[in-house]
Image (cartoon, grey):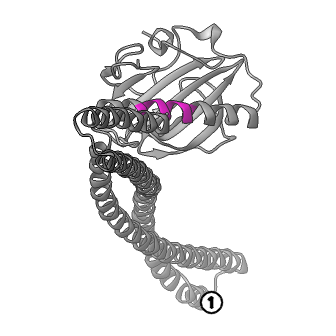
Amino acid sequence: MREEYFRKKSRQYASVLYTGVLLCACFTSPVNADQDQLSGVKSEISRQEKQLSANQRQLTTLNSSLKKQEETIGRLARQIRQLSGTITSLQTQISSLKKEQRVLQQQKIGQTEMLKELLNTYYRQGQQSQLQILLSGEGSSEQDRMTVYAESLAKARQKAIDDLTETNRLLAEKKARIERQQTELEQQRTQLRQNAKQIEREQSAKKKTVSSIQQRIRSDNTYLSELKNNQQRLEKEIKVAAERVLVRMDGLSPYKGRLRWPVRGRVQHTFGSEQSSELRWKGMVIGAKAGTEVNATHDGTVVLSNWLRGYGLMVVIDHGHGDMSFYGYNQALLKQVGDKVKTGEPVALVGNSGGQKSDGLYFEIRRKGKPINPQSWLVR
């Protein structure tokens, strides 16, 4: 569409210049002057076509840069999310280990006191009592009783020693595990800080790229052409995706008015409202904070998970029977093609990819390839 627009503009420009040449020809008789004017027109037409072509190439290059930057941001955002989860898990594990360590320390104190008492009893009631029995001339039954008592005392003492040794071993093990977990926790935190700094740099570079793209398409006609081309690219990708992944499900028909909102926020653009002078929104845009989880509106299979020009990082879920839901403008994608998803399962993170000015989610529902008003299908 953009190429057709550029050719049309070139022809219009040529027509205007050519008319000017004919008017000049009416007032100038020399044939050479006429020839010079015509040559000048052709030269100007050629220059204009080259300029338009160069602008188109630069726009394509800028979008390629935007794609790389937003894919990098998406990868970093996924890593940050995973690191945050790992850090939370490590903190929980360390807290649990420290609690177990405190219990073992109290257990050790009790076992130590018990062992001291057993040792005192053993030495008070042990060999000295045996000697007193022999000197007193008491019978063998008393000696047997004292022998059994001494053996029991020795066993209790040995068990107390074994228990204390095991407690010390467990304490040493807990201490080592806590130290390892704390080391890993610090490594994860360091990586998280590095990723956060890198994502800031990528966001800054992205902002410059988006500004350059907006300057290239600042005219109404160029902007309209870009929007139309973006829609055509989306149609093409969806057609290929639908053929690649066959989904056997019941579709969305039974769930009209009961589908889950993919994200909660203010609706910035409604279905059918004006997007440009000639185009209407085929979905809705929901404003939300960057990094917020985008949830699947219903069970289905991911058939597209990629960057698309104008829509940024997008996930498309096939629900069967020709019903699909679209989630665009994301900061990061959490699912891949072929993944099965359940209602409410996170599939992406809210962002502003695709050159958007503010954070939000582009959400669309299609039935047999035709966009429908998604808001009427969502739970009220």
Position of 182 relative to 244 (above/below): below
Q: How many marks?
A: 1
Residue pointed to by mark 1: 134
Amino acid at the residue labelled 1? Leu
- Residue 291: x and y in percent read 37, 43
Q: Magenta span: helix, strand or loop, mainly?
A: helix
Residue at 44% across, 53% down: 57
Q: Is residue 227 magenta?
A: yes
Query: Could you tell whether 156 is left or right of 48 in the image?
Result: right
Q: Is residue 344 visible from the viewing direction of this image?
A: no
Secondary structure under tag 1 reads helix
- Residue 50: x and y in percent read 40, 52
What's the magenta region? 225-234
Q: Is residue 297 magenta?
A: no
Residue at 68% across, 75% down: 148
Q: Is residue 166 visible from the viewing direction of this image?
A: yes
- Residue 4: x and y in percent read 49, 34
